[in-house]
């Protein structure tokens, strides 16, 4: 029997996990053990701190459910989510860059026609987002599905609001044969991440901004192309330089141009002033 010491515990644990039946699991777990032990040694982790971390992880799991992903939020504010995105979506320089999914995406959003309104008369300044979806060669991508969602004027997503029976500020749109798309919504606002849970507890002990700049989420799928998870950010929005989840990219910042009452991009008419944002998405082939 080999005696366990501070000097040999890391390799003993790593070797044990390296025996996992799946080679990738063995590789990941052995590396995780080595890095966790290195972290504990670097900071000389106390038993009190270790127990506090265990409690924090437990509370993070307890507050999570089908509508709230506190672990994703933790990953976001630690920069891990964005690191994984960067490593796994190293697209061509001409392709639209990916960013974080975030914890508030809901499957099964309703399908809307070209120019369809996903705001359903919620208060806010009307915003039309128009443009096209194309490949790296500039060819239009017909039938691409844009899954779109955002927060309301109070910074709340549908999953954060109790007793909602219908989809709120989320919808799916398909591109036309020429690759064009058009959707109507309301102008997004910057908002705070949820601060009532374990992640908020951590943030409150720092000077870190807990806000995200105004943005709209997109998840785009098209046959023959890599899925694209991204945002469009409002040009000039507050918190662009201090996004708490590190999701902002200059290529995704777009002007929300003011428009007077009159014709709208969907062929209709607006009796009130509105905003227009135009963006052409470029997809990476598989």
Image (cartoon, rainbow, N blue to C red):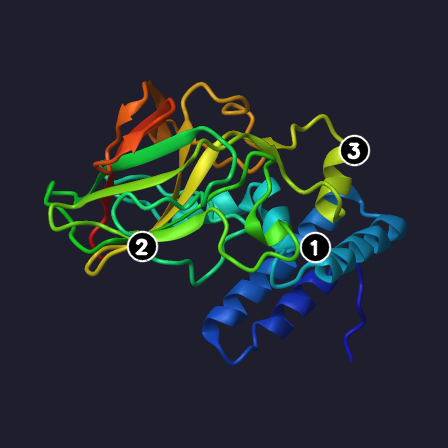
Specify few, some or many for label 1: CA neighbours under 10 Å numbering under 14, 14-19, or 20 or more.
some
For marks 3 and 2, the one nearer the N-term is 3
Give percent across and percent down for residue 276.
32, 27
In the foreground, 214 or 271: 271
- Up/down of 259 relative to 32, above or below: above
Q: Is residue 52 left or right of residue 250?
A: right
Q: Which residue is mark 1?
A: 37
Image quadrant in which the N terminus is located:
bottom right
State the image quarter where residue 7 is shown: bottom right
Give percent across and percent down for residue 11.
66, 64
Q: Which residue is mark 3?
A: 205
Give percent across and percent down for residue 102.
52, 48
Specify few, some or many for label 3: CA neighbours under 10 Å numbering under 14, 14-19, or 20 or more.
few
- The structure residue drawn at horizontal position 59% and vertical position 56%, both measured from the top left corner, is 164
Task: Evaluate if marks 1 and 3 touch, with contact meaning CB atoms under 8 Å apart.
Answer: no
For marks 1 and 2, the one nearer the N-term is 1
- The structure residue drawn at horizontal position 51% and vertical position 81%, both measured from the top left corner, is 21
For marks 1 and 3, the one nearer the N-term is 1
Alpha carbon of mark 1 to alpha carbon of mark 3: how far?
25 Å
In the foreground, 277 or 118: 118
Residue 227 numbered mark, or none? 2
Q: Secondary structure at mark 3?
A: loop
**Residue 93 seen anywhere in this rendered image of the structure:** no
Q: Is residue 217 left or right of residue 262?
A: right
In the foreground, 237 or 108: 108
Q: Secondary structure at mark 1?
A: helix
Specify few, some or many for label 2: CA neighbours under 10 Å numbering under 14, 14-19, or 20 or more.
some
Alpha carbon of mark 3 to alpha carbon of mark 2: how far?
37 Å
Number of numbered markers: 3
């Amino acid at each position: 029997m080999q005696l366990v010491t501070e000097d040999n515990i890391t390799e003993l644990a790593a070797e044990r996990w390296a025996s996992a039946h799946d080679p990738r699991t063995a590789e990941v777990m052995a590396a995780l053990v080595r890095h966790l032990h290195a972290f504990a040694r670097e900071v000389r982790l106390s038993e009190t701190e270790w127990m506090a971390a265990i409690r924090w992880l437990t509370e993070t799991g307890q507050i999570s459910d089908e509508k709230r992903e506190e672990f994703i939020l933790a990953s976001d504010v630690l920069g891990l989510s964005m690191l994984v995105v960067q490593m796994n979506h190293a697209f061509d320089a001409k392709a639209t860059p990916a960013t974080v999914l975030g914890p508030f995406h809901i499957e099964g959003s309703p399908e809307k026609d070209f120019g369809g309104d996903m705001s359903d008369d919620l208060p806010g300044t009307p915003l039309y987002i128009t443009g096209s979806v194309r490949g790296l060669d500039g060819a239009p991508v017909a039938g691409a599905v844009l899954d779109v969602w955002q927060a309301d004027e109070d910074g709340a997503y549908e999953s954060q609001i109790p007793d909602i029976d219908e989809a709120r500020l989320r919808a799916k749109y398909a591109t036309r044969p020429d690759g064009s798309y058009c959707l109507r919504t309301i102008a997004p606002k910057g908002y705070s991440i949820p601060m009532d849970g374990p992640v908020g507890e951590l943030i409150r002990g720092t000077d870190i901004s807990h806000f995200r700049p105004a943005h709209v989420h997109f998840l785009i799928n098209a046959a023959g192309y890599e899925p694209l998870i991204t945002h469009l950010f409002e040009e000039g929005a507050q918190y662009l330089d201090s996004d708490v989840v590190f999701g902002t990219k200059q290529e995704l910042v777009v002007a929300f141009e003011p428009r007077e009452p009159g014709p709208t991009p969907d062929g209709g008419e607006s009796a009130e002033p509105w905003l227009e944002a135009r963006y052409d998405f470029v997809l990476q082939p598989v």
